[in-house]
Image: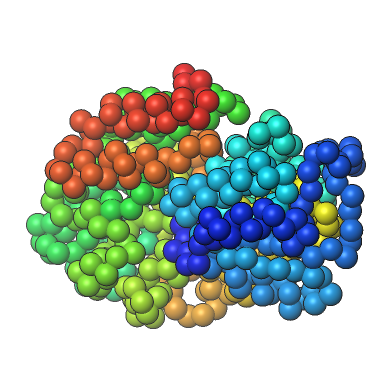
Amino acid sequence: MGGIARASRVIGGAAVMALAAALAACGGGNDGGSTAGSYGFPQVAQDDQAEITVWVDADRSGAADAFKKANPGVPIKVVTYDGSANGSNSFRTKMQLFDRAGSGWPDVVFSTQNNDAAWASQKSGGKQAFAAVLGDGLVPQATLDGFTPGSLDPCTVDGKVYCLRNDLAQVVLWYNKTLLAKFGYAPPATWEEYQALGEQVAREHPGYIVGTVGDAWTPEVFFWGSKCQANGITGPTTVTVDTGTAECKRAAAMLDTLIKNGTTPNVSVFTPEFVKTYSGKVLVMPGPAWYAGAIFNNPQSLNVPKGQLGVAAPPAWQGDTAVTGNVGGGTWFISSHSTNLKAAAKFAEFVTTADDYQVELAPGYPAFAAAADKWVKKQESSGYYATDLQAIAKAGTEIWDGWGSGIFSQEAIWAKTMTPAIADGKSLVAMLPEWETAIKNQAQVNGYTVQ
């Protein structure tokens, strides 16, 4: 799964300080020894034989293993951390420690978040930006051009690319084809039909559900897909926030109805409660591409039997074009401090583009277009799905560009402000002004001018 990872072994504070003190082990350098390089940023002296240190979350350990198998001659040290999952901000916090120490930066870092380029592209504590510029020769332009159009937008700041996307997490409509046929229902094509289905299910089949609102990425599923202008990043330090629009209100009103009637419960999909209560009870569920393996085709979760799970395009609002939100989709950064940029770039390119990982092993829909096509064919050939997966591919090109990738975490804001309100039975429509205030406050704390 991309941006939402259930990571395991987190690097502790003591380990961070030890790493900061061990420059040689982590492949880094300080600005004092840097010289202007050919890639658009200052570089330390390079050593093509130097070991590179790569930080991954637990779910991306397979990517590192695949690289080592394909490149046995490249010395690499792999460190597992939480991947900044659920807005923990650990990636940024640890790099700030290394900035203060003047050494210790890892050569490559994976993050589950899409908002890291906003800070990693900027100077910190007098040090040069952590993220290396990729588009000035470090990564071939042909490689950058091979990513799905729009997929590198979260990696692009002031026209420069600072990271590579691992996977896309476009929202689609998952549904149980067997159950829908049994009950005489059809997959909804519009959000109005989706709400009507939820109301019908509540009357005719109580206990069955059409979605959930228990996770921090709820706004990315429902509000992003409604073109709600809650997160309009218009520049490196500017954001437009307006949750009072009709687009925000229509999504909130729909959810108010479905939360009240029990068809979109306030339960996280990654809890034992969800699995116990709703196994065999999910009729439809809007959610990211990675729900396929993380929730439905997972013995530890819903474990939907072969031949039942179908996928349809994300619903559209009547009179509007269909767009989708994006729930995660990890990013890979190369450190501008690396003493072996050649190996670091080779690793980052491999894990984002090579079939060895992205097609054969990756659980999510690859951001690299050629790998994505092959990934879809491989998934379809498994015989698990009740439909083809072309809706996933199409949705990958329909992610709405009005929702940006700022430094602050929308998921953290939602979890703190809106999730407790839902638990208290409050109306989302009534809470929209409070959500807007919380977003504005967090943006301003992070130096944004709010428009």
Scheme by which the image is coloured: rainbow
Residue 51 falls left or right of residue 88: right
Percent from the top left, x then y, of residue 172?
42, 55
Q: Find the residue positioned furthest to the left.
A: 203
Percent from the top left, x then y, of residue 57?
55, 63
Residue 381 falls left or right of residue 198: right
Q: Residue at x 33, y 53 (%)?
A: 215
* Residue 123, quarter of the rendered image: top right
Q: Residue at x 38, y 68 (%)?
A: 295
Percent from the top left, x then y, of residue 192?
27, 44
Residue 230 falls left or right of residue 106: left
Q: Is residue 223 visible?
A: no
Q: Nearer the viewer, residue 36 or 234?
A: 36
Q: Nearer the viewer, residue 68 or 321?
A: 68
Q: Residue at x 39, y 43 (%)?
A: 412
Percent from the top left, x then y, of residue 59?
53, 68
Residue 344 falls left or right of residue 283: right
